[in-house]
């Protein structure tokens, strides 16, 4: 049987996840990448995007609000700005965040508020809603 890879997801607040899995797929800023045991070592910057990981026939999902991934042959360490497992996501909160961001974006030209910041908040909110919909069964 193929060896498992150790996945750790760390945020400024907490260790979100420390788990042996068969495969991890991350959303890098250069595109999606998958990691199995024995992968060549590399570093990647992560986009605001989904991470999924599979152990046996169970797959789980997390929302990653950008960060870095360090890959070695035995482990993947994700350092994320913020991260939540799918089932931990508060969808009402994400909806409110999206609505706030929408309002700010609509006012952005008139009031010259920080468009990039509102856009980033919008991306995080949309990601959280999408990942929450995925559910998940593991971890
Ligand atoms: P909000 O405006 O709702 O705070 P945000 O995008 O500004 O959203 P972040 O700064 O990315 O929030 O995250 C702050 C903390 O709150 C992090 O620990 C993050 O994991 C958590 N968090 C943010 N939104 C949610 C959510 N919808 N469900 C669960 N945890 C969340």
Image (cartoon, rainbow, N blue to C red):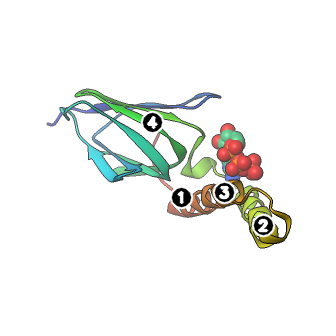
Measuring from the top left, give residue 71's x and y in whole percent: 31, 32
Report the Cα–Cα distance between label 1 and label 4. 19 Å
Mark yes or no: residue 43 visible: yes
Q: Which residue is mark 2?
A: 108
User: Where, by quadrant of the figure, is residue 112 drawn?
Assistant: bottom right
Judging depth in this view, the residue of 30 and 113 nearest the camera is: 113
Report the Cα–Cα distance between label 1 and label 3. 22 Å
Q: Secondary structure at mark 1?
A: helix
Where is 83 relative to 72, above or below? below
Mark yes or no: residue 103 visible: no
Of the residues tagged 1 and 4, which is closer to the observer? 4
Q: Which residue is mark 1?
A: 131
Q: How many marks?
A: 4
Of the residues tagged 4 and 3, which is closer to the observer? 3
Judging depth in this view, the residue of 58 and 65 nearest the camera is: 65
**Residues at marks 4 and 3 touching, judged by CB atoms closer than 8 Å:** no
Q: Is mark 1 within 8 Å of ligand 1?
A: no
Q: Which residue is mark 4?
A: 68
Report the Cα–Cα distance between label 4 and label 3. 21 Å
Q: Give the mark, 4 or 3, whose residue is nearer the N terminus.
A: 4
Q: Which residue is mark 3?
A: 116
Q: How dense is the environment of label 1, judged by Cα within 10 Å: few (below 14), some, or many (20 and up)? A: many
Q: Give the mark, 2 or 1, whose residue is nearer the N terminus.
A: 2
Q: How dense is the environment of label 3, judged by Cα within 10 Å: few (below 14), some, or many (20 and up)? A: few
Where is 41 relative to 48, above or below? above
Q: Give the mark, 2 or 3, whose residue is nearer the N terminus.
A: 2
**Residues at marks 1 and 3 touching, judged by CB atoms closer than 8 Å:** no
Q: How dense is the environment of label 4, judged by Cα within 10 Å: few (below 14), some, or many (20 and up)? A: some
Q: Secondary structure at mark 2?
A: helix
Of the residues tagged 4 and 2, which is closer to the observer? 2
Q: Residue at x 47, y 39 (%)?
A: 139
């Amino acid at each position: 049987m193929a060896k498992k890879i150790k996945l750790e997801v760390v945020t400024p607040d907490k260790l979100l996840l420390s788990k042996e899995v068969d495969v991890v797929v991350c959303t890098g800023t250069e595109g999606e990448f998958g990691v199995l045991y024995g992968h060549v070592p590399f570093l990647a910057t992560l986009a605001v995007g989904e991470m999924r990981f599979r152990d046996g026939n169970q797959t789980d999902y997390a929302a990653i609000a950008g960060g870095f991934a360090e890959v070695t042959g035995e482990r993947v360490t994700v350092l994320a700005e913020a991260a939540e497992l799918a089932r931990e996501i508060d969808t009402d909160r994400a909806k409110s965040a999206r609505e706030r961001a929408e309002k700010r974006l609509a006012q952005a030209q008139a009031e010259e508020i920080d468009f990039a910041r509102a856009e980033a908040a919008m991306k995080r909110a949309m990601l959280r809603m999408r990942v929450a919909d995925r559910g998940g069964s593991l971890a």
